[in-house]
Image (cartoon, rainbow, N blue to C red):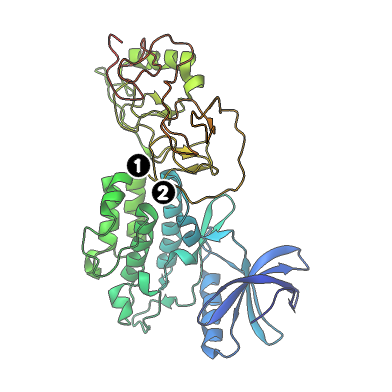
Amino acid sequence: MLRARQRIGKYRILGRLSSGPLADVYRAQDTIQNVRVALKIPRQDERTGHEELLHEVRVATKLKHPNILSVLNASYIDGHFVIAMDLGEESLADRIERRTSLARKLDLAGQGLAALACAHQHRIIHCDVKPENFILFPGNQLKLADFGFAKRCLRTLKASGSGTIDYIAPEQAMGRPKFQSDVFSMGLVLYRLFSGILPEWPFEWPLAGHDRLRARVRPELVQVLHKAIRLDPAKRYRDAVRMQADFEQAYSGARRQKRPRARNGTKGGPSWRRMQWREFRRHFGKRLETRHPCRNCEGPVAESMQACPWCGFDNPSRGAETRMPAHCPRCERGVKNDWDYCAWCYGPGFVEEATRRYPDKRYTARCANERCRGPLMPFMRYCPHCRIKVRKPWKLEGSRHACKACGWGIARDFWNYCAWCREPVRGA
């Protein structure tokens, strides 16, 4: 076990990142190139650790892909076999534990599948696909690492049941890994990424967290995960290449909004409606921050809206990118890291990610709770600091009209429904 400040060749150890059964991973400083790297070093009493790491180096060298962690250098230094790799920010296992937008999850899932598909195209079975082996780098770039257990698929495949038990496929646990085994493990990784729950044996569909999964992603993506996690390998995707193709098709469907067709065959709906939307944006777009298209009709909506003011669709901006630093795991609207609760959906308390309070130009009011008096942004339904419901109706600057049901300000000349309570606004 190496210690902080200890020198090994040109590297100065800064600390230990993780420990495995065969090797330890350290954060280190390259004193010549003046960059920080990750060093993977087998334990001195584990001869098999040297063989596994040597195999990992040779496999990683064959795979050139932006989503596969490459080896910077591998050599024997002071009696240690040392592998130097790029140093990431955190693992996918760490990122899963924090709030993440659906768009970001889809992007990370796509990168992970691209890496595994590249390995399968080179006839390499990873054999240890799990969140801990996906490393995040700046710019949300995801890279697959740890090919120590990887097997080369030849006419005959000799392999052990190596892998992590929580994500291992049944046939791999019995010593017969296949490309479908990696597909099974990747399916479990993505299931946990999107639902927040890791299913357990016997993997009978619907799995734990299925309702949460269906509420967050499109049915096409649910079907991709269902096929990947089938117990019978013959019923799964043959390899990650085919799984990636189906995922990309479902992924593009998740990003693409269906546009209604006008009678003349042109896309985007009647021209008068689009003119109405442009006029609305000119009057109220900046005040309401209507930067998103409705998931149903594509009309301009804000993430603070509970319903689309054009078609009444519930949570019309769900899954869209936000200017906030994080997302509520329940409604997926933007939230700030110093909030204790979601201001839009009365969601559960969050894990505190900041000890200080951050000022924001969007704060325009104060919580009515004398014990709180926390700052509020327009059209918040609940105080993000004490969770008390906002009682005083919000007014819409530039409009004299209010909803008869909830009393909040509305754009009566444009809207068909109240964006705050979904009541029809005709005659309001």
The disc labelled 2 sits on which kind of residue? Leu
Q: Are marks 1 and 2 in contact (CB under 8 Å)?
A: yes
- Quadrant (top left/top right/bottom left/bottom right) for the C terminus: top left
- Disc 1 to disc 2, how far (Cα)? 9 Å
Instruction: Return the residue at label 2.
Output: 106
**Above or below — where is 94 with respect to 266?**
below
Q: Please tell me whether mark 1 sits on a helix, a strand or a loop.
A: helix
Q: Quadrant of residue 391?
A: top left
Residue tagged by mark 1? 254
- Which residue is at the front of the view, 426 or 29? 426
Q: Nearer the viewer, residue 385 or 120?
A: 385
Image quarter of residue 228: bottom left
Compare residues 127 and 55 and report the one nearer the observer. 127
Q: Position of residue 51 (x, y in %)?
A: 53, 85
Residue 395, placed above or below residue 117: above
Q: Position of residue 153 (x, y in %)?
A: 38, 76
Instruction: Tell me if 338 is positioned left or right of 319 in this view.
Output: right
Question: What is the x, y in percent for residue 305?
Answer: 39, 28
